[in-house]
Amino acid sequence: MARQTFMLPDLGEGLTEAELVNWLVGVGDEIRVDQPVAEVETAKSMVEVPSPFAGTVAELHGKAGDTIDVGKPLISVEAGERSAAGEHPAAAAYRQEERAGAEPAAATEPAAEVAAESGSGNVLIGYGTRGGHGTAKRTRRPRARAASAARREAAGVLGADPGRATTAGSGAPDPGARAEESVRSGLAERPGAPGQAPLVISPLVRKLARDAGLRLADIDGTGAGGLVLRRDVEAALAGGLSRPGAGAAPEFPAAAQVPETAAGAPELDPRSGLGIAERTPMRGVRKTVAAAMARSRREIPEATVWVDVDATALLELRAALKRKDPDGAPGLLAFIGRFVTAGLRKYPELNSRIEGEDIVRFDGVNLGFAAQTDRGLMVPSVRDAGKLSARSLDAEIRRLTAVVRSGKATPEELTRGTFTLNNYGVFGVDGSAAIINYPEVAILGVGRIVERPWVVDGVLAVRSVTELTLSFDHRVCDGATAGGFLRFVADAIENPAGILAEL
């Protein structure tokens, strides 16, 4: 069979490399056109890369943690199609379960075969498979790693050779094989089934059980031949079957390493004379953030202005809305976002970008907002935020926050912003001279809201006060423009009803 090598595609936005986070297939696996084969991380997002080829995986060019340049080999495939003839009944049941849980009835296997032969035309950030012209439909397919596990599981049931369990290029055991082996090793504890692997193939079932801390060996399957199905795991959960501390082990070893000398003693730092506790490579999200922040500081001559704001009226307005609609009242960030978009219409210099010797202004505002996640700081943006009401803006902010925290935000969602709003008050701090999110030209920070003494109509009172901080590129405007914009937003917070009536 002819070998075809798939190069890492152009990931867009001028990115030239990506970190390989996880292989979704192994050597020897059969794959289809558009089946995801790897997860890569770039532009602060996790992206599943689908294969434009169908056939047998011949070689994986790299291992988890490697950085691969765009245009370099990612995976090699021996051309050919998988035959469904002689398919084990357990595998067939798994395929039926996957379709029942995730596909419409019309999405059938023959349609997938047509897509494999003609090319899907599906596009991932600037590249597509051959021949589809965007007309072929893509059906949901189980991940190839699970398919590999399925073949090994079926082979174990049938008494056949389960095949290789190593990842090409690393020489290390496949994590999926290790997990399966650990399940097999624990089966001797299960009465009536010594040495027999649990009959389960679906990766969804495995993940559901793993996340719940359940041993598949302890679950009785109701599928054909004792196959463990999703409903069996859910029934076990409902029945209280669990084991504390039985959660999944981390998929990858920790990146941090404790350096040692040849004699086994901790490495000493020659400058400080102290021992080095750990050495962690800067990569992935942290590497992306570091590069963007360094470029912002290097290229943007920024200035900062700030002002204290009485937010009492805004808090009272939101409290009144919350009493009427407890679940639908917009959050404070959404209200401030509305004031920001209105201010940018009045001061468009701050909603721009510098390209060469030109200042490019935009017709509309893509409002970015900083969101802290387990993988680092993300800045998704709401497209055309100025056209949304406070309620609609709040819903979109919540949706994008959930997306980035799940690691599923697209590069477009993370790079299309034209102005950023940063609510660092959630960390309990009053102010910060934030670094501008390159290539934007301004960022507005909002500190925590605290009760402070405040003069109202000549009388000292206790009010809810916050601090607004605006960092801006001094090349696009002067202090008068920046101060005017900041004062506009501050006045809107102090008198929200009047501003909202005009929007």
Image: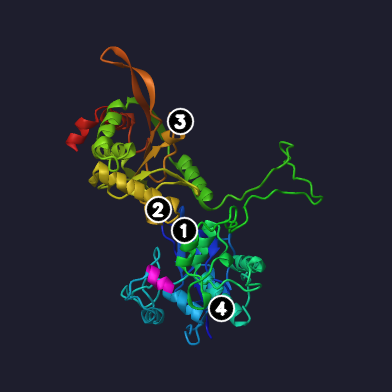
- In this figure, which residue is indicated by the disc labeled 1? 238
Q: Type of residue at label 1?
A: Ala
Q: Nearer the viewer, residue 475 or 294?
A: 294
If you read the primary sequence from the N terminus, does the residue marked by circle 2 or circle 3 appear first? Answer: 2
Give the main secondary structure, helix, strand or loop, of the magenta stretch. helix
Label drawn at residue 429: 3
Q: Give the distance between the C-alpha atoms of the residues marked 2 and 4, in whole angstroms.
A: 36 Å
Residue lying at 39% horizontally and 48% vertically, measured from the top left: 401
Mark nearer the viewer, 2 or 4 = 4
- In this figure, which residue is indicated by the disc labeled 4? 154
Is disc 3 in contact with disc 1, using a CB cutoff of under 8 Å?
Answer: no
Instruction: Return the x and y of residue 407 as percentages of the image width and height.
Output: 45, 54
Give the secondary structure at mark 1: helix
Whether residue 138 is situated above or below residue 114 in the rendered picture: above
Residue at the far bottom in the pictured view? 85
Magenta-tinted stretch? 97-102
If you read the primary sequence from the N terminus, does the residue marked by circle 2 or circle 4 appear first? Answer: 4
Q: Give the distance between the C-alpha atoms of the residues marked 2 and 1, in whole angstroms.
A: 28 Å
Give the secondary structure at mark 4: helix
Q: Give the distance between the C-alpha atoms of the residues marked 1 and 4, in whole angstroms.
A: 28 Å
- In this figure, which residue is indicated by the disc labeled 2? 403
Count of numbered labels shown in the rendering: 4
Residue lying at 41% horizontally and 55% vertically, measured from the top left: 409
Mark nearer the viewer, 3 or 1 = 1
